[in-house]
Image: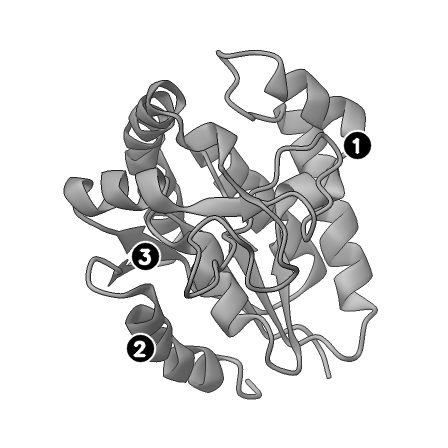
Amino acid sequence: MVLRLVVPIFGPPAAGKTTLTMHLGNEPGRRVFRLREHVSEEVLAATATSSERLGWIDEFTVGEAVRSYFTAGQQDPDIHTVLLDNFPGSAAQVDQLLTTLWTLTSCRIEPIEVVTDIHTLKQRAKNRKVCHRCEHDPIHDPRLPAVPTTDDPWQCARCGGLLHPRRGDSPRLFKARLQRYHQTAIGIRTAFTDSGIPVTQLDTTNTIEGAANLLAPLLISRSASL
């Protein structure tokens, strides 16, 4: 088995990118790439202490992480599909990704832009929670959406621990993250389309799970042997 499909998933904060990859990434042969899991704790800590950076990682570090990940992935016979959670985040990162993939592989690239109306984005950001016990984030800033129990919205259904609001969903940070996305989105789309790679939009306004079910057949068909 060789790498046949790479699916960059990008979109505004709280649109459901991570939930999508959590739903779709558990199938055999699929892996999920999250950039923060492939950079050093020092780099993450530096982004967390600067309100201007909002978790932004410098392009050199990004390039090294992407090359290292896909070089290793090419040697793993069990991987045929990689989902990129919230990546790329800029036109420069699109160029880094495409250069890396075209150097290493002839896989298909299917970028997905997740779209949701602003009211839904704000409501999700207000309500979603994370679990510090289940997700051992190196700088204690967990990102993966936690599932609460049916009886208590602040209790984790997985471990029973106390849930917390996600740091980046505070009104001030969420507004800044949303603004940054709108500033970079056009460049991301243009970088893909100028390279001959169309971007598919996926609406998650109603349900993220429903959107995942719509995307699943595409992943199956596109990951078939070329």
Query: Splitting the image into 4 quarters, where does residue 107 fall?
Result: bottom right
* Percent position of residue 122, x then y: 25, 38
Q: Earlier in the sequence, mark 3 or mark 1?
A: 1
Q: Please name the amino acid that badge 1 sits on.
A: Ser
Q: Local crowd at mark 3 within 10 Å, few (<14), some, or many (≥20)? A: some
Task: Measuring from the top left, give residue 48's x and y in whole percent.
Answer: 61, 20
Secondary structure under tag 1 reads: loop
Q: Nearer the viewer, mark 3 or mark 2?
A: 2
Task: Kindly identify which numbered label has been placed on residue 199.
Answer: 3
* Residues marked 3 and 1 touching at CB (< 8 Å): no
User: Circle 2 sits on which residue?
Assistant: 214
Q: Residue at x 47, y 45 (%)?
A: 129
Asked whether residue 57 appears in the rendered view, the answer is yes
Residue 207 as seen in the image, left or right of residue 6:
left
Please, is residue 80 above or below residue 162 in the view?
Answer: below
When the figure is inspected, residue 181 is found, relative to residue 50, above or below; the finding is below
Q: Which tag is nearer the camera, tag 3 or tag 1?
A: 1
Q: Secondary structure at mark 3?
A: loop
Q: Quadrant of the C terminus?
A: bottom right
Q: Is residue 178 left or right of residue 57?
A: left
Count of labels shown? Answer: 3
> CA–CA distance between discs 1 and 2?
35 Å
- Does the image show residue 12? no
Under circle 2, the secondary element is helix
Separation of disc 3 and disc 2 at Cα?
16 Å
On the image, the x and y values in percent for residue 90 come to 45, 33
- Expressed as whole percent of the image width and height from the top left, the position of residue 80 reads 65, 77
Q: Nearer the viewer, residue 127 or 103?
A: 127
Instruction: Indicate whether 84 appears above or below 180.
Output: below
**Quadrant where the N terminus is found in the figure:** bottom right
* Residue for badge 1: 40
User: The disc labelled 2 sits on which kind of residue?
Assistant: Leu
